[in-house]
């Protein structure tokens, strides 16, 4: 016999309760919770209790905005009287939630005698079925159970699952259902299975999840009407912003596409904790770039994206920060689209906002900065070609990406074009990561601060009066008369 520890204590099933008579014994909060679930399933719910909490009436019989023909209202019957166990056979499913141990036991015993399934709240020893933690997204229903051992654990697992499910999953399920008969009439069983696998893994489902339902419907009709029963699988590319480094700052959409990817091309700024979200069997290709050293040229990266997508693979181009903020995501978008390949851009928390938040520096402030400007501190030939006069104006925040190698030059140019050398400045290295280092001081000391604090990793420069705000909270900012190199 199989070891009992590997056996299921409860067998998971989904019951059709539409129009079925269900009994809830109890009029308090526990009974209210169970009644809500049964009403959502379309059951006709009879609630028996010698005393009904006002909350019960308020929510289920006098809900704001509900109409007289509200279907859930018409499926609810409240009887303010103590339930008589001999009436148990009238109901198809029973829930004992009175909070009275003696009454709940009587209800359970009567249900067992009548051969009716019964759930007794907080008494798994009396239950013939238990209610799982539920995720409900239209036709998609997920039930999570710990066999009654820990309902709180089940709720925590539910929260984790919900965090990775697409927000429009309900729409995707309804979309697929609307084409089910057409697909069934067109394809044989084996072909039908492959068709739906291609659909859910391909660009049409991505269009639905992204809100492009009309576009998806046109593609779906074309796909069904194709004469080839085994068309090549369509590949697609997701250009994904992975945020400033902390995996907790990944967007839900980013996590979803990473877990579905066949191939992932990733940058130097993508740490191993972020790559942990990638499917284990996905092919990973490092295409990172550092100053004066590129593991792949941009043309080679573009070619890889196109190659793998044309081979029918789901490709993720994973980039630090946001792909459209100094990430060359626009170039990759153009290269992929020019080949007729479906592409989706998933925005990320840009490094500027993520690092500033981690250093508690507001980029705008009513008293200090009414504008913020993002620039790169590294040009094609090394030295940035910027409008220094415009950047040296007061009353704004200047955020400089990739400015570490040109720190001295940046400070020199800004001061030469009129920005006060005592303007507050912050250097944020490895922002949002555990090894984050934040150094603050006046602009005139930028070069010395970079050198003295051995700033070597990815660093963001924040220049402006707001830089002093985060430093003052930590008691760090002090003026300096040191001069730039």
Image: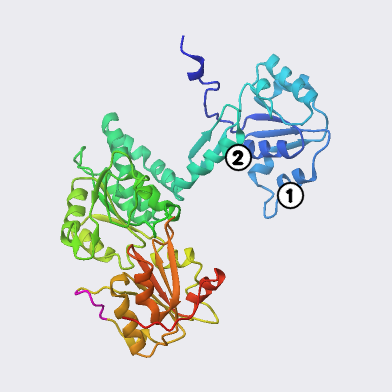
In reply to whether residue 382 is colored magenta, the answer given is yes
Residue 190 in view of the camera: yes
Q: Which mark is residue 452?
A: none
Asked if residue 321 lies left or right of residue 52, the reply is: left
State the residue at coordinates (26%, 48%): 222
Across and down, in percent, residue 323 comes to 32, 62
In reply to whether residue 256 is colored magenta, the answer given is no
Q: Residues within 10 Å of mark 1 (few under 14, many from 20)?
A: some
Q: Which residues are magenta?
A: 381-385
The residue pinned by badge 1 equals 62
Q: Is label 1 in a helix, a strand or a loop?
A: loop
Is 207 located above or below residue 421 in the figure?
above
Asked if residue 463 lies left or right of residue 71, the reply is: left
Q: Which mark is residue 40?
A: 2
Is 252 located above or below residue 233 in the figure?
below
Q: Is label 2 in a helix, a strand or a loop?
A: helix
Near-viewer residue (74 or 117): 117
Q: Main secondary structure of the magenta part?
A: loop
């Amino acid at each position: 016999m199989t070891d009992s520890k590997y056996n299921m204590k409860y067998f998971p099933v989904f019951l059709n309760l539409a129009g079925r008579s269900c009994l809830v014994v109890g009029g308090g909060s526990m009974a209210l919770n169970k009644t809500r679930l049964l009403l959502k399933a379309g059951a006709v719910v009879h609630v028996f209790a010698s005393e009904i909490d006002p909350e019960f009436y308020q929510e289920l019989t006098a809900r704001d905005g509900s109409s007289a023909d509200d279907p859930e209202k018409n499926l609810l019957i409240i009887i303010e009287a103590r339930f008589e166990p001999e009436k148990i056979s009238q109901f198809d499913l029973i829930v004992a939630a009175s909070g009275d141990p003696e009454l709940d036991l009587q209800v359970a015993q009567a249900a067992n005698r009548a051969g009716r399934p019964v759930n007794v709240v907080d008494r798994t020893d009396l239950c013939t079925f238990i209610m799982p933690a539920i995720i409900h997204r239209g036709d998609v229903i997920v039930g999570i159970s710990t066999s009654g051992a820990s309902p709180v654990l089940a709720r925590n697992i539910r929260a984790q699952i919900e965090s990775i499910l697409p927000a429009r999953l309900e729409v995707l399920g309804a979309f697929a259902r609307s084409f089910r008969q057409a697909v069934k009439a067109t394809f044989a069983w084996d072909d039908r299975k492959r068709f739906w696998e291609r659909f859910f893994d391909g660009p049409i489902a991505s269009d639905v999840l992204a809100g492009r339902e009309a576009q998806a419907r046109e593609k779906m009709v074309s796909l069904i009407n194709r004469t080839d029963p085994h068309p090549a699988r369509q590949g697609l590319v997701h250009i994904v912003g992975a945020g400033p480094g902390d995996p907790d700052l990944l967007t839900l959409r980013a996590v979803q596409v990473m877990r579905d990817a066949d191939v992932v091309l990733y940058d130097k700024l993508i740490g191993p904790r972020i790559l942990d979200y990638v499917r284990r069997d996905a092919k990973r290709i490092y295409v990172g770039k550092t100053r004066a050293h590129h593991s792949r040229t941009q043309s080679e990266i573009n070619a890889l994206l196109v190659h793998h997508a044309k081979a029918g693979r789901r490709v993720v181009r994973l980039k630090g920060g946001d792909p459209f903020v100094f990430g060359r995501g626009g170039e990759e978008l153009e290269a992929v689209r020019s080949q007729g390949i479906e592409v989706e851009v998933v925005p990320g928390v840009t490094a500027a906002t993520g690092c500033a938040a981690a250093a508690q520096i507001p980029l705008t402030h009513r008293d200090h900065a009414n504008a913020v400007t993002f620039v790169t501190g590294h040009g094609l030939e090394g030295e940035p070609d910027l409008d220094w006069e415009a950047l040296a104006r007061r009353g704004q925040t200047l955020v400089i990406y990739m400015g570490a190698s040109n720190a001295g030059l940046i400070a020199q140019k800004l001061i030469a074009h009129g920005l006060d050398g005592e303007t507050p400045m912050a250097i944020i290295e490895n922002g949002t990561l555990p090894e984050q280092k934040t150094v603050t001081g006046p602009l005139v000391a930028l070069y010395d601060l970079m050198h003295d604090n051995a700033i070597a990793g990815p660093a963001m420069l924040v220049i402006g009066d707001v830089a002093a705000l985060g430093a003052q909270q930590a008691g760090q900012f002090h003026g300096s008369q040191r001069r730039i190199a």
